[in-house]
Image (spheres, rainbow, N blue to C red):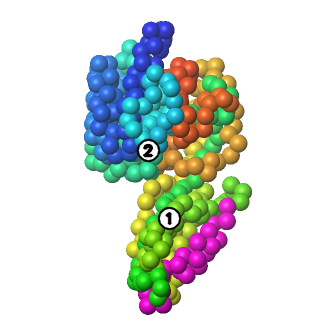
Amino acid sequence: MTLTEQDITTLIRFRHDLHRHPEVSGDEVQTAARVQAALAALGPDEMVTALGGHGVAAVFQGAAPGPTVMIRAELDALPIRQNSAAAHRSLAEGVAHLCGHDGHMAILLGVAQGLAQQRPATGRAVLMFQPAEEDGSGAAAVLADPAFAPLRPDWAFALHNMPGLPLGQARVSAGPANCASCGLRLHLAGRTAHAATPDTGLSPAPALYDLIPALVALGPGGALASGFRLVTLTHARLGAPTFGIAPGEGELWVTLRSLDDADMTDLKAQAQDLAERLAAQHGLQLDLSWHDDFAACHNDPQAVAQIEAALTAAAIPFGPTEGPMRASEDFGRFAGSGARTAMFLLGSGPDCAALHDPGYDFPDTLIAPGISAFSTILRRILG
C-alpha cells in the first residue's frame, strides 16, 4: 500500500481523537464505536462487534483459500491522571492513554486502509481491536466468546511501543517475552475492641506482620531465567484511621510474577496455602480473591521469523530484545487458540516518558513504520 501525507494526517487526527476520549478496561463503549465507524467506512468483508465485551474485529477476505492472520491492537486506557498541555490531552478526569493503545489502534486502522485498497490474495486478515488488556481479562474474554471461534487465527501478531529504544527501531526475539502475573487480595477479619482494652478484641496485625515477609519470600526475584518468581507487596491496610479503636480487620494486596505459567500455578498454590495457614493460626477469617490474571507471553520462532523478514523488507532497523520483560501482556493467551504468536517492540525514543507515566504520549511518527511492518507481514503470508 502507499500511504500519502494526507493518510498519515488523518490517522494522527484519529489517534488524537481517541486520546481525548480514553476509557478504562471494560468500559470501552465509545472507543469501540469510534473504531467501528472508521472501519465501516473502509468496507471490510465482515465486522464482528462486542467480542469479549467491547472488542471489534474487521475481516478482509482473500480470493483463494489460505491461512488466517490476526493483527491485534488494544482499546483500553489507564486510570491515571495525565500531566500534559497537548491540545489532544485527555478530557476524562483521571483516565488517559498512557500506554500507547491509541497509537496501536491508529496503526491498525492504517493497515485496514491498505487492505481496503487491495485484499489479500489468499486466506483472511483479521484486525482485532481487543478490550481490557490492562487488567488481563480482555484476551481471555475474546477467546471465550463463541463469536470468536470462526475467526480463530493460524498466525497472530502484535506490537508495543517501547520508550527508551531508538525511535522507530524494532526489537524481537523468540522464546519468553513477558512474565505471567496475578494479583492476590487477602482480607483478614477478627474483632474490633476499644484501644484501651485491645486484649478483648482480635487484631489481624500479628498475622499481617507474619504474612508480608513470608509472601515476599515466596518470590525473591533475581535473574529473569527459568524459575524466576517475584512477589510484590502493592497495598496494605489495617483497621480504620482512628486512635480509639483497636483494629478488627485488614487486608494485603500482592502481585505474583513468574516467567512461565507452570511456575505461576505453583506460586499461586503456595501463596494461598500460606495465607490460609496463617489466618487459621491467628484465629482469623480469610477472604481470598484473584485479580488481573495474565498468562506468560512466548514468541513462537516461526512467527518471529515472519516479523524479522517483514522488518527487513520494510527497511525498519531491528535487533534482538534484551530478554523477557517483567511486565505482563495478555496477548500471549492467543497462543492457546492454536495460533503461532509473536509481539515485537517498536522504539518510542530515548526521550519519551515511560509507559504509564503521567507525561507519556505516543509518538505519532511511529504510525507509518507500524503500518508498514504489519502490512508487510500480511503480504508475506497471504500474498
- List x then y, in percent, for residue 173: 65, 40
- Taking the image as shown, residue 67 lies to the left or right of residue 373, namely left
- List x then y, in percent, for residue 306: 57, 32
Residue 90, located in which quarter of the rendered image?
top left
The label on residue 10 is: none
Asked whether the residues under the numbered discs 2 and 1 touch, taking CB atoms below 8 Å apart as contact, a structural biologist would say no
> Considering depth in this image, is 196 or 375 the residue closer to the camera?
196
**Residue beneath the point at 44% across and 9% down:** 6
Q: Look at the image and give the residue range highlighted in magenta.
A: 198-221
Residue 69, located in which quarter of the rendered image?
top left
> Considering depth in this image, is 108 or 383 the residue closer to the camera?
108
**Residue beneath the point at 39% across and 43% down:** 24
**Residue beneath the point at 43% across and 83% down:** 194
- List x then y, in percent, for residue 176: 61, 49
Crowding around mark 2 (Cα neighbors within 10 Å: few <14, some 14 to 19, many 20+) is some
Amino acid carrying label 1: it is: Trp
Q: Is residue 154 magenta?
A: no
Q: Is residue 209 magenta?
A: yes
Q: Which residue is mark 2?
A: 79
Q: Which residue is mark 1?
A: 253
The image shows residue 163, relative to residue 244, as above or below, that is above
- Taking the image as shown, residue 248 lies to the left or right of residue 367, namely left
- Distance Cα–Cα, label 2 vs label 1: 18 Å
The image shows residue 231, relative to residue 212, as above or below, that is above
**Nearer the N terminus, badge 2 or badge 1?**
2
> Considering depth in this image, is 84 or 265 the residue closer to the camera?
84
Dot 2: element: loop
- Taking the image as shown, residue 370 lies to the left or right of residue 137, namely right
> Considering depth in this image, is 96 or 332 the residue closer to the camera?
96
Q: Is residue 356 visible?
A: yes
